[in-house]
Every structure is written in C-alpha cells, then in structure tokens.
Image (tube, grey):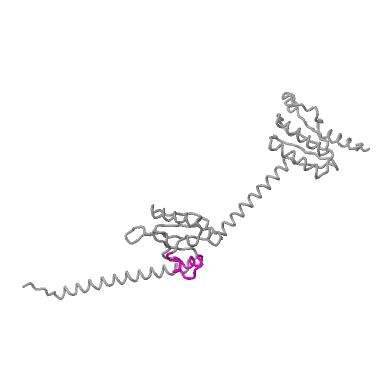
Amino acid sequence: MKDTRKTKSQLIEELTGARSRVAELEALTERALLDQRLLRVFLENASDKVYFKDAESRFIKVGRSTAVMFGQSDPAAVVGKTDFDFFTEEHARPAFEDEQEVMRTGQPIFKEEKETWIDGQETWASTVKVPLRDEEGKIVGTFGVSRNITEQKRVEAESAQLQVEVLNAQQRAIQDLSTPVIPVLEGVIVMPLIGSIDTLRARDIMRRLLQGIREQRAKVVILDITGVPIVDSGVATNMNKAIQAARLKGARTIVVGISDAVAETIVDLGLDWSGIETLSDLQTGLRVALQGMGFRLVRSSE
C-alpha cells in the first residue's frame, strides 16, 4: 500500500506557496480597490463631462459634473439613459453614430460639436470618444470626455465678426480714398480719379459723386482724370452715366486732365464726348467753375 503521507518539507513548501498566492491576491485586491478609489475621485471631481457607455450607447457610469449638466444631483440617475433623453435629434443622432463608429473601427474620434438640448439651450463641446474594452480586449462600449467650449466659441464668433467689420471698414476707407470728394469752395467739389476704372469702381464713383453733391450742395463738379491711364468704351459709358446723374441733381460737370493716350483711345473707339464739358487741367477747370458761379479772379498787386 502506497504511503500518501507528506513529508514535513513538502508541507512547508505547499504552505509557502499558498501564502505567496494569498499575498498576490491581496496585492491584486488592493490594486483593484485603489483603481476604484482613483476612478471614484476622478468621476467626483472632473469638471469636464465624463461618461462610460455600453454597446447600445446607454450610460453605465458618469461623473458628477456630467450628472449636474443633465439636471441630476445623483450620477446613478443617469445610468441606463441615452443622449436622446437630454438632447434633440440634431445632436443625439450624430453622437450615437459616432459611438457606433468607434466600436466598429476601434478608432477614437475627436471633434468639436454643437449640443442642442431639449430645453432649447445650445452649447459647444470639444469631445473625444475612445473604445471601452473588457479584460479580454473585446470592445464593449465607449468612454468619452467632453469639454464645454461655449464661451470660447462665443469669443471666436465675436472675433470673426470684428474682423469682418474691420475688413469692411478698411474696404470702405480704400474706396473713399480711391474716389475722394474734395470740397474746394462752397458749391464746388473736385473728384480726382487715379488708376484703372472697371465697372464696379465706376458704379462706386457715381455713388460717391451723388453723395458728395448732396452733402456739399454742390453746383459744380470737376472730375479730374489726370491719373486714369486707360479709358475704354465701358468706362466712357459709365462716366457718361455719372455725368447725367450729376446733371439730374442740378450740378454742372466738368472733366479735366484728359491725357493724349486717353484722347486717342476715345477717338479710336468712336466715343461721342461732344456733350461733355472738358478742359485741359484742374487749374483751368477751377477757373471756369468759379467764373460760372459769378466769381471774379483778380491777381493781387505785389
């Protein structure tokens, strides 16, 4: 008959092994308890919206601040609910689809998203969602963190609006500089034009000209085109319209500073400027304008 009794050394070895396994279990338990304490502290104190969801995108654990955002004092009250319980379809549907995509691909998603709440408020969040795995590595849900960036978005929108306003102001300033109206005497204004004139600028010239006539109560307008290098049929037509509009406002219009090149272009194009009063230069134009208004220019004696 076989002797099944263990020697003292075997018993000591087994006892030592058992103690070692107990120590390992105690270490694992302590580590698990530490992990749970750390998770609890994290969920209790995280200011961002922190949440865990199952494969059906139902909340299985959320942070306290998340519960407060959802109008709940107890995070447990959120468990089992979905985004559809708090948000409109506009936000809840894309959020659900994002989570399903994360679980399908195993790839995280980073995005900025507008949150539309059932109570009508709108917020913005910077969100990251990653796959939630079990001990075997199988994806069983998602883990997400959303930071409220509503104020940041508001500041960005105001900054963008301010940039638009500044740009518009700069464009208006450039337009004013490119089509200045200069009052030289009561009832007389000068509009010096410099550079090329296209259809858009020609319309602005007419607008500024009529505005200047109205504001200065001008009786005479002098268009100085000394700085205009090219005049084509389109420019001539628009200038004719501007002059006709000025006449309708009761202002006499004189065009000065026609260069040789511009004069040749007008002739080559067969443009009829016979009905437009033209003079050689601004000095002559001013003299004629003043004489037409009854002023007499007398050289003072030295």
Residue 114 makes an appearance in the image? yes
Q: Quadrant of the C terminus?
A: top right
Residue 302 makes an appearance in the image? no
Q: Residue 267, percent across and down?
A: 74, 24
Horizontal side, residue 272 vs residue 96: left or right:
right
Q: Is residue 108 magenta?
A: no
Q: Residue 264, percent across and down?
A: 74, 25
Residue 291 to residue 71: above or below: above
Q: Quadrant of the N terminus?
A: bottom left
Taking the spot 76% from the left edge, 36% from the top edge, the residue there is: 242
Return the residue nearer the eye: 174 or 7. Answer: 174
Horizontal side, residue 213 vs residue 38: left or right:
right
Taking the spot 48% from the left edge, 54% from the top edge, the residue there is: 111
Q: Residue 40, percent across and down?
A: 42, 69
Residue 233 to residue 300: above or below: above
Horizontal side, residue 279 vs residue 229: left or right:
right
Give the magenta-colored segment's residue range.
Answer: 62-80
**Furthest-left residue in this view:** 1
Q: Residue 277, percent across and down?
A: 82, 31
Displayed quadrant of residue 14: bottom left
